[in-house]
Amino acid sequence: MSFRFALLVAGFVLAALNLRPAIAGVSPLLDEIMTDVGLTPAGGGAITTVMIVCLGVFGPLAPVLARRIGLDRTLLAGLLVLALGVVLRTLDGAPALYAGAAVAATAIAVMNVVMPGIVKQHFPGRVNLFTGVYSSAASAGAATASALMIPLERSTGYGWRGVSAMIALPALAAALLWLPQALGKQAAAQNGPRPFRAVVRSRITWYVTGLMGLQSLTFYVILAWLPTVFLEAGLPADQSGYLLSMTTLVQVGATFAVPVLAGRRRSQSGYVAAAVLLTMAGYLGLLVAPVTVPWLWMIVLGVGQGAAFGLALLLITLRAPDPTAVTALSAVAQSVGYVLAAVGPVLFGALRQSSGGWTAPLGVGMAILVVQLVVGWLAGRPATFR
């Protein structure tokens, strides 16, 4: 392995590690944030919702930027803006909190969309492997953030603002590592036809979009409310946070292994079905016996959600023929998908508030997973848009 290729892989992995901490780091600190800033439960859930809405609304910026400055420079810009948004979010007052969340999420939206195109551009012969690498790195970033926020707060004494600001450091480190790629010859703007018309007219686009959106909805619901579910079931705060960390950590292995295996097959439908059924089993455990064997539910849920996430990203890369088309398909699937996903945390919070428990929200989650199973099966069938 040459030094140039090793630097490429290192920058790519560290960039992927930054795709989730700014979002995952909110949940363990949510009670403290709400108390300090004076937010209601709906207002606390809105932090995550604002970020998810931005993931959907601003994703279409990525193909525009990629055509003008190239995929590599677009990723570099995303990392720098992410660091800025994370710091802005820690300033005093609710407006800064929400504005910083929006800026950080806009950067993540652009990065989310360009990553499949970067896989297609830099690793065209190993799409399944590097999709597994970056999707598992993204999951690892979420697991690390959710696990370290409370211990860092206790050990440093900085409070939620100080430890939240630390999330900017790995983004800046990734930007430094990615700088050689952004300055290289391959970083030129993308030329050629705009494939959006072919993308939006294809049924496979909307199957992939449905899978991306619904698996994202279930993921962000768990990310936003899982510690609260366990707290209200009687578990202490630190154990609730560790269980969230466990399920996100388990996702790391699934998001790596499943795309690598599924990418070797002509059809990925069977893998999608297995992922959704495992997620349903995890939801059922939370519904029926959340404190009996919570670690088991978290393992099952983590495998299912991690596999679904990795498969959604793999299908975006497999279903389009070149980096430009992959970026366009990624923009549609992730933008529409994340707008759909934004409904999740607020919907579950409202259902919890109106019903007085978690039976109704988790029941709705099970129904959503049935729909995910159908669209995922269709998305997994071999096809490309034309």
Image (spheres, rainbow, N blue to C red):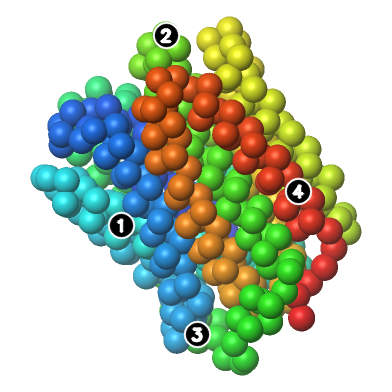
Q: Amino acid at mark 4?
A: Val
Choose between 274 and 176: the one closer to the eye: 274
Measured as percent of width and height from the top left, residue 113 is found at 53, 66
For discs 3 and 2, the disc positioned in front in the rendered view:
2
- The mark that comes first in sequence, 2 or 1, is 1
The disc placed on residue 374 is: 4
Q: Is residue 110 above or below residue 194?
A: above
The residue indicated by pointer 3 is 67
Q: Residue at x 78, y 42 (%)?
A: 273
Q: Quadrant of residue 183?
A: bottom left
The disc placed on residue 234 is: 2
Measured as percent of width and height from the top left, residue 212 is found at 61, 54
The disc placed on residue 181 is: none
Instruction: Tell me the distance, in whole angstroms, between the alpha carbons under discs 3 and 1.
Output: 24 Å
Choose between 200 and 312: the one closer to the eye: 200
Instruction: Tell me the distance, in whole angstroms, between the alpha carbons under discs 1 and 4.
Output: 32 Å
Task: Characterize the local packing of mark 2: few (<14), some (14-19) or many (20 or more) Cα atoms within 10 angstroms.
Answer: few
Instruction: Tell me the distance, in whole angstroms, between the alpha carbons under discs 4 and 3.
Output: 34 Å
* Relative side of 346 to 248, left or right: left
Task: Characterize the local packing of mark 1: few (<14), some (14-19) or many (20 or more) Cα atoms within 10 angstroms.
Answer: many
- The mark that comes first in sequence, 2 or 4, is 2
* Relative side of 322 to 151, left or right: right
Q: Secondary structure at mark 1?
A: helix
For discs 1 and 4, the disc positioned in front in the rendered view:
4
Q: Quadrant of the C terminus?
A: bottom right
The residue indicated by pointer 1 is 102
Q: Secondary structure at mark 3?
A: helix
Choose between 6 and 294: the one closer to the eye: 294
Q: Amino acid at mark 2?
A: Gly
Q: Amino acid at mark 1?
A: Ala
